[in-house]
Each structure stands twice: as C-alpha cells, then as structure tokens.
C-alpha cells in the first residue's frame, strides 16, 4: 500500500531529524596565529600579515553539522578581526567578526576564541580578516563536506583542488589604504592578480612559482573557487576544458556547464572538471588556467594583469617544458558575457536539497547603491571629484563605524552609538542610471544607521545600481543569512512589471550577489537569526567609504529564537 503525501512528508521529516542528530556532529579545534611573515612576489620582498605563516592561509575542513572552534592569537603589529564568510552563525553574532559591528578588534598580544557552527552550509566558503585592507593576505578556504551517511548530489570526484583568486600589492596594503584616506582619492590598483597567491607565468619573477595542478586522463576533479580580491571581479577559464558549476556560496546548484565563470569578490563556487583532453600521445598535456578582471567602468583604475596557473596531465613523457595552451576568456568589459553566466545559475531544488523561497513579504526595501563624495575636511587638498573626498552610500546613508561595536551597544542598550532609522527607500528619486546625473546628487552624509527587524520577518531587498560618478558592479554581502536571488535586470527597477518575472521556483541561494552596473537585483530572506548583522559591498574600498548598513533582528519568543549569551572573552575597545 502506498504512502499518502502527508505520511511521506512525515517520514522525510523523521529522516531529516535523525540525520541532524548531534551523534553525527564533531567539534574541531584550530589555532590561528596572526603574524608578520616575509613574502616575495614580483621581484620584491616585504612583510605581510598571515595566519600560521601561510599565504593564502590554512583551510578549515568540516562536515555539515560540525562545529569548529578557532583560537585567534594576534602576534601581528595591528588590530585585527576574522570573519567566517557565508556561515550563518545561528544565534551567535558574537563570533561573526566584522570590526566595530559585532566586536571590537583583537589587539596585538591578545587572543579571542570563535565558535563556527555549520548548520545548513555545504560546499565551499571562506574566512578572512575584516579590518582595513588586511584580507588581502589574511584569508583561506572553508571546505564543508556532506554529513556522514550522506553524499554529494553528483558522482564523487576523484580529487579536490582549492583555487583562491586574489590581488598583490608591492606596497604595504594598509599604506595603500592610508594614502587614499589622506588624499580622499581612489585606491591605487594592485600590481598583480593571483591564483593561490601566485601571479603566474606572465609577471616578473613569477614563473618558477606558478601554481600547478596535476591531473589524470578520465578522472573528475572538484575545484573549490574563491574570490578573495579586494577590488576585482574575474572571468576564469581553463584552456580547452569545460567547467560544470555544482555549487555556489555553500549551497548546491543545478549542474551548469560553461566555458568560463564570472566570480565577484566574496563569492565562492564549486566546479567539476573532467580531465578529458589527453586523447592520444600527440595531444597537448599542459593547459593554462587563467583569471582576467572584469570591469564595466573605464573611469575606475584597476589592475588588468591576467593571473595564470597550469593544468598538467600525467604522462609517461617529460612534457613539463612545453608551453601550455592559452585559455580563451571574455574581454575585460564584456558585460554580456558576465550577465549570461550569472543568469544561468539555479538552486538544485531537489528532494534532499529543497528551497523555501518566501512568497509573502513583510518588509520591502529599495536600496540605491552609489559612489558619492563628502566635503574635503579642514585645509586638506583632496584629490576626489571637484576637490571633494570619495565616499559611498546605501540610500544616501554613508555608514561610519562607531567607537564601540553595534552589537554591544544593542545588547547593553548603550545610547548614541547608532540610530535605528535606516530608510526603506532613497531620500530622493531620479533616473538612477542616466549618463549625466546632476552633481547635486553626488553628496552624501556620514551616519551609523541600522534597520531593526522583528524575528521571522520576511524581507525583500531590491538593490538599485546608480550611475553616480560612473556605475560599476557591486558585490553585496549579507552576514548571518543566505538569500534567494529572485530577479535581476538592467535599468531602473519597475515595481509593477519586474516582479512578474521573478524566479520563485529555483532561484540561486547565495550570500554575496553582484548588482550589475546600472541594473538591479532582488533578493528575499527570512530574518530568523537574532542578532546584529552587517551588510556591505565586498569591494573593500567601498566598504571603508560607507557602502554598508546593519540589520538588527530582535529575539523571538522561544529559546531557539534568542541570541546566545555574550561570551566572557569578547575583545575590549
């Protein structure tokens, strides 16, 4: 006799509860030592901040359901915090990591123990510093395997490889930041783009250290791709090989075959690579993996170098001196290629990995994203537009870090640290994407505004790109949550027509989304994680200029809906 639909659902629920039982979970302990380490790139040696002397830093391995406890010891020369990017940290904003949002920084000589709990995340995520420009070198991968007794929703690969895209400055990265802050102008672009910390074959003094991956014909490899760059989005491809996207931001996707990917800062992807090109003894055995920046705004200075690594087939012959085949990549400003790739992503939406897209929305937010200016302070001679200082904003509110963290101010009801009046819409409307926006819209004001949400509120945010001072893509990241990307388009969002094309069936489930130049993106999520959660652009200079805001989600009525107690070892301001 067959099961009724209700009985089948109950049986699946029992199975899920059994699978989520703590008997499967493990607690892992790691020690991360922040320290200065000499590092040589592009013929120059300098000291950089690292974790455990490694650049990129160590990988955290866990299973879905596990907990990782990380003791962070700061032996470096400056304040620092660490963030576990894409981990929801349920009820535990205390260990999320953004400086002056959920904690004060860890001072030199001090330490702080953070608890990372993986409750729904599965796939590829990453961790990084969340202070100044420190994440340029302080970052690493997080690999979350399926729970014991479960498996990938695709055939198990033969091997896994992590590829971290990033940037290298010959100067000290925080000197680069300080120069921009003093002059009020833009940040000097990096000197090289990198794959796993190496620029590759086409940059000075780099060829001997180009990252290499050895593969065998016929085997399948899982690539864990992370964009850790401060400023650059990338096109990435492997010569003569197709890639299959199977995961994004710690969630599975429908298999998506492509010749290239486009990945923004903060995003992660899980890719399958079939090593299928060594068909006979005369077939090439070496192929370039390449990352080229994508930038749709010619007004913004950026590093245009192409980072390379090498895919090498194992053969009986010594072919390691032969020139690899070049990868074919879209052009630097190929918005059509970037859009075509992004539009192909869909959640897996299977029996084992269902989606629960909010259909009824309690809180609608329309957030205009802009690069702005603020008046040049005092007698300074600023180099920003019209002698002003560059800034950025969300709904014309340019976020300014408070002297103590927002979370403590909220927890202890400390007044005059923030104001709970972040607006649901811009203060004025105009054609946000026109070519010549009047200069009166350039100015913004500094503030520390937050948006307060009731527990379990369903939220829709439409991010609206603007062409103020030249538009560009903006990778927006939300802490403490993943969200469904239900719609995207170009031009000014039409609240009557555009929602008709929303994908409410299998939208991608992400934590960082690129808002296209002069376009919009709509996301939906449920505010079911009590605490204080940062939302910001993952271009680091935009974060520092103020393209940020904070959500405060109130406690619910049950114990499971309330924030965990404040840890005793929180750093002091």
Image (cartoon, rainbow, N blue to C red):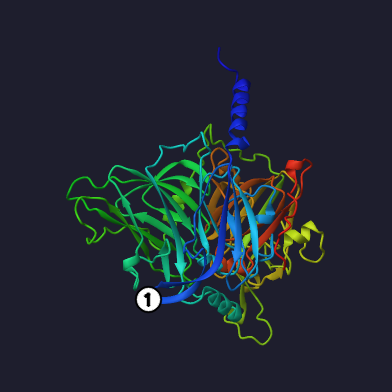
Q: In the picture, residue 32 is in which quadrant? A: bottom right
**In the picture shown, does residue 153 fall above or below 52?**
above
**Residue at image mark 1:** 43
Residue 365, position as x, y percentages in the image = 68, 53
Q: In the image, is 82 to the left or to the right of 346?
A: right
For this rendering, which residue is in front, 412 or 477?
Answer: 412
Q: Residue furthest top?
A: 1
Residue 201 shows in this picture: no
Residue 398, position as x, y percentages in the image = 67, 67
Q: Residue at x 61, y 43 (%)?
A: 119
Q: Secondary structure at mark 1?
A: loop
Q: In the image, is 299 to the left or to the right of 101?
A: left
Q: In this figure, what is the number of numbered marks?
A: 1
Q: Residue at x 29, y 51 (%)?
A: 240
For this rendering, which residue is in front, 112 or 304?
Answer: 112
Q: Residue at x 76, y 42 (%)?
A: 559
Query: Where is the C terminus found, in terms of image quarters?
Result: bottom right
Residue 554, position as x, y percentages in the image = 76, 49
Q: Residue furthest bottom?
A: 379
Q: In the picture, residue 435 is in which quadrant? A: bottom right
Query: Where is the N terminus found, in terms of image quarters?
Result: top right
Residue 354, position as x, y percentages in the image = 56, 35
For this rendering, which residue is in front, 417 or 518?
Answer: 417
Residue 549 shows in this picture: yes
For this rendering, which residue is in front, 217 or 288?
Answer: 217
Q: How busy is the neighbourhood of tag 1: few (under 14 within 10 Å), some, or many (20 plus)?
A: few
């Amino acid at each position: 006799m067959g099961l009724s639909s209700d009985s089948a659902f109950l049986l699946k629920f029992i199975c899920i509860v059994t699978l989520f039982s703590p008997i499967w979970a493990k607690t892992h302990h790691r020690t991360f030592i922040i320290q200065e380490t000499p590092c040589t790139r592009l013929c120059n040696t300098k000291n950089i901040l690292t974790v455990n002397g490694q650049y990129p830093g160590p990988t955290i391995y866990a299973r879905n359901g596990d907990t990782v406890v990380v003791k962070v010891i700061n032996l470096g020369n400056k304040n620092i915090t660490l963030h576990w990017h894409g981990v929801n940290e349920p009820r535990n904003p205390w260990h999320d990591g953004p400086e002056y949002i959920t904690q004060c920084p860890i001072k030199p000589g001090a330490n702080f123990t953070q608890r990372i709990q993986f409750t729904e995340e599965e796939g590829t995520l990453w961790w990084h510093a969340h202070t100044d420009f420190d994440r340029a070198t302080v970052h690493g991968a997080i690999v979350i395997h399926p729970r014991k007794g479960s498996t990938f929703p695709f055939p198990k690969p033969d091997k896994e490889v992590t590829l971290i895209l990033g940037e290298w400055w010959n100067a000290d990265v925080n000197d680069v930041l300080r120069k921009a802050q003093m002059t009020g102008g833009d940040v000097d672009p990096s000197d090289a783009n990198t794959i796993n910390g190496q620029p590759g074959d086409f940059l000075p003094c780099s060829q001997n250290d180009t990252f290499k991956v050895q593969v065998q014909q016929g085997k399948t490899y899982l690539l864990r791709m992370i964009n850790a760059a401060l400023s650059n989005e990338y096109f990435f491809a492997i010569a003569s090989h197709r890639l299959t996207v199977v995961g994004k931001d710690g969630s599975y996707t429908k298999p998506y075959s492509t010749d290239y990917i486009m990945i923004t800062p903060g995003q992660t992807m899980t890719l399958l690579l079939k090593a299928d090109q060594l068909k006979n003894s005369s077939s090439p055995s070496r192929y370039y993996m390449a990352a080229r920046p994508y930038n749709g705004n010619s007004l913004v200075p950026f590093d245009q170098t192409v980072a390379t690594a090498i895919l090498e087939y194992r053969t009986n012959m010594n072919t390691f001196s032969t020139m690899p085949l070049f990868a074919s990549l879209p052009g630097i400003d190929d918005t059509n290629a970037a859009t075509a790739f992004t539009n192909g992503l869909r959640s897996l939406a299977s029996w084992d990995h269902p989606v629960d897209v909010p259909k009824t929305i309690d809180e609608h937010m329309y957030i205009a994203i802009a690069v702005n200016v603020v008046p040049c302070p005092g007698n300074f001679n600023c180099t920003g537009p019209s002698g002003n200082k560059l800034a950025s904003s969300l709904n014309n509110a340019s976020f300014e870090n408070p002297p103590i963290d927002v979370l403590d101010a909220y927890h202890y009801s400390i007044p005059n640290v923030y104001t709970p009046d972040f607006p649901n819409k811009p203060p004025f409307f105009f054609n946000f994407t026109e070519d010549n926006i009047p200069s009166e819209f350039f100015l913004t004001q500094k503030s520390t505004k937050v948006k307060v949400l009731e527990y379990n509120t369903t939220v829709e945010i439409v991010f609206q790109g603007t062409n103020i001072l030249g538009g560009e893509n903006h990778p927006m990241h939300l802490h403490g949550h993943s969200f469904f990307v239900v719609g995207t388009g170009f031009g000014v969002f039409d609240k009557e027509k555009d929602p008709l094309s929303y994908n409410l069936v299998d939208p991608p489930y992400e934590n960082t989304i690129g808002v296209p130049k002069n376009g919009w993106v709509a996301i939906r999520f449920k505010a079911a994680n009590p605490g204080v959660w940062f939302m910001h652009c993952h271009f680091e200079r935009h974060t520092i200029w103020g393209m940020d805001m904070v959500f405060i989600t109130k406690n619910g009525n049950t114990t499971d809906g309330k924030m965990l107690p404040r840890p005793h070892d929180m750093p002091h301001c």
